Image: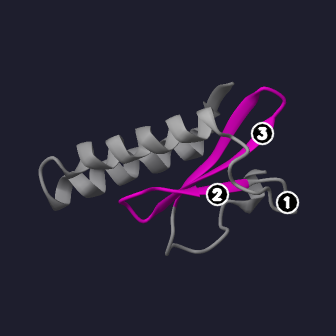
Amino acid sequence: MSIRFLSLADQEIDDAVLWYEELAEGLSRDFLDDLDRTVRLVVTYPDLITQTKAGNRQFRFARYPYSLVYAIDRQTIVVLAVARQRHQPRYWVERI
């Protein structure tokens, strides 16, 4: 199964990387490692998380307060957001 990130989700990754790198050197690499592990799990087990009524799924990162919000469109996982868990819940809904 392939994966595609919406441009807004890519921007959220970039913003998080900048934020964590400002906090401490190397922290952004740890964030990207956590993102990579999460993406690999979602690609391997896309149906692991139950689909909501809106048709999306949220998979929480292991170490960082983020979730990978995605939907499945045929054979493609579409990442709608890389959402901070405490940041305006469901702000990304209009991206569906």
On screen, 41 above or below 62? above
Badge 2: how crowded within 10 Å, few (<14), some, or many (20+)? many
11 with respect to 43 (left or right):
left
Q: Amino acid at mark 3?
A: Ile
On screen, 43 above or below 38? above
Q: Which range of residues does the magenta coloring cover?
A: 57-83
**Residue 25 x/y as whole percent:** 12, 50
Question: In this orientation, does residue 5 appear?
Answer: no
* Label 2 to label 1: alpha-carbon separation: 12 Å
Q: Amino acid at mark 1?
A: Ala
On screen, 83 above or below 15? below
Q: Amino acid at mark 2?
A: Gln
Judging by the rendered image, the residue that carries numbered circle 1 is: 54
Who's the residue at 76% across and 53% down the image?
A: 56
Badge 1: how crowded within 10 Å, few (<14), some, or many (20+)? few
In front: label 2 or label 1:
2
Who's the residue at 51% across and 72% down the image?
A: 87
Who's the residue at 79% across and 51% down the image?
A: 96
Judging by the rendered image, the residue that carries numbered circle 2 is: 58
38 with respect to 94 (left or right):
left
State yes or no: discs 2 and 1 in contact (Cβ < 8 Å): no
Kindly state the secondary structure of the residue where label 1 is placed: loop
Query: N-terminal of the two: label 1 or label 3?
Result: 1
**Residue 9 x/y as whole percent:** 56, 45
Q: Is residue 68 magenta?
A: yes
**Residue 30 x/y as whole percent:** 26, 47
Query: N-terminal of the two: label 2 or label 3?
Result: 2
